[in-house]
Image: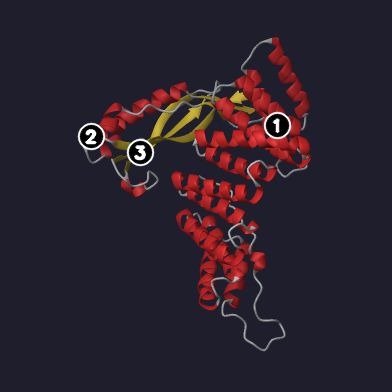
Amino acid sequence: MPRSQTVIALAALIVFSTPANSESTEPIWTDAYRAYQTAAQSGEADATLSAARQVFQLASEQLASDDKRLVALSSNLASALQAADQSEEAAEAFEQTIALANAVYGEQSDQHFDLYSARAFALHDDRKIAPAYKAYEALIDLAESRYGDDSGDFATWLLFAGKALYDECRSVAGTKWIRRAHSILERESVKQPQYQHALARASFYLAKTRLTERKRFSAETYFKQAVENVDRSAPDGDTLLRASHRYLLGIYSNNDDEAAVQRQREVLVAMGPQDEPETVYVPLHRTPPSFPVRMARGKTEGFIDLIFTVDKEGRPVDVDFSAIGLRNDSDEPSSDMSTYEVQAAVDAFSSRKFRSHAKSLINIAKDTLEEWRYMPQVIDGEPVETEGVETRLTFEMAPVG
């Protein structure tokens, strides 16, 4: 799925080892690095990646493994791989960069926070959810050892990891971390006002988890808390404020009583005429699918990619599938797509058993989506249909032991 790429700000560490007035020759990778800079400034991902590979290879032949410039060049390569959507190799490159950074800076430098988060992003981009979860755990452990487990800085990183996990549908772990971060920030923001905007973020994300759980009263409370604490001068301040207002409008629009109507008016006044109440569709309630009995008995795992329309009432309609993947019981991680037989049609599966399982997944998926609800997209104050919404339902066996 598309994601804004993390940019590692280590390139500033690049300092050529030979002074300008020296008679010694420049490092062998000087020209390659200049080509990398030119490509990076042009925004050409393939050219940037090619240049980053070359400069790192040349520098590796000349620089010691504990040279900070090698850390920077390795980071450049990892970022270039991620920008070129080569997530698996990017994750490996970030691992390499972390190992180099450990040798140069120790294991708790400022650079490590960027590297750990970038590694987790790369794993998510490659749909390796379990390894990404462990990468976020490592990031949290790093923050705890650096700041303590009850500080505002620790809670900020905890919130970052929790939001990332929640967005990837690991609701239990993500919600747990968001809730814990919110609790710390709620306390710390009273003593240190600089954490108020972080509290606004935590309140916003916690409110979204409550909406998914159909706890609208609780969600309303946290969205209001987000509005109260948002710092509009922050880079995401206006966006966070508008989103909180729009979610509140969606909550109130589901009630016809006079009090809800009055609250809608108050929100619209607070939004002002310059902020039209226009939203994208928002998930409100998504129940997980049941595991097909025959698949469970046969230790078969699978997934189904769905495409549908969210109608004006927030219901998924016109549900269809774009791909189904099935595999027999395997010790390989579920993110390893090579272990699945993936087809775009039921009849295309190689075995009758898989064809039967594929039909079961289609039926269960449609039953599941009948229970889902969204806040519909709103344009010019009116709900509209949203076509082409995509999601994936996974059916995995619980690990033993």
Q: Earlier in the sequence, mark 2 or mark 3?
A: 2
- Please tell me whether mark 3 sits on a helix, a strand or a loop: loop
Q: Residues within 10 Å of mark 1 (few under 14, many from 20)?
A: many
Q: Spot the residue most to the left.
A: 352
Please name the residue shown 62% across and 72% down the image.
34
One can see residue 127 in this view: no
Residue type of the residue flagged with mark 2: Lys
Task: Please provide percent x and percent y for residue 58.
Answer: 52, 75
Q: Nearer the viewer, residue 85 or 28?
A: 28
Task: Please provide percent x and percent y for residue 67.
Answer: 59, 72
Q: CA distance from mark 3 to mark 1?
A: 41 Å
Q: Is residue 221 found left or right of 66 in the rendered image? A: right
* Disc 2: which residue: 353
Q: Residues within 10 Å of mark 2 (few under 14, many from 20)?
A: few
Q: CA distance from mark 1 to mark 2?
A: 51 Å
Judged by depth in the image, the label closer to the viewer, 2 or 3, is 3
Q: Is residue 184 found left or right of 390 in the rendered image? A: right
Give the image quarter of residue 253. top right
Give the image quarter of residue 248. top right
Q: Earlier in the sequence, mark 3 or mark 1?
A: 1
One can see residue 47 in this view: yes
Please name the residue shown 74% across and 15% down the image.
262
Residue type of the residue flagged with mark 3: Gly
Q: Spot the residue most to the bottom.
A: 23
Residue type of the residue flagged with mark 1: Ala
Dot 3 and dot 1 residues touching (CB under 8 Å): no
Is 46 located above or below residue 169 in the figure? below
* Disc 1: which residue: 226
* Disc 3: which residue: 401
- Please tell me whether mark 1 sits on a helix, a strand or a loop: helix
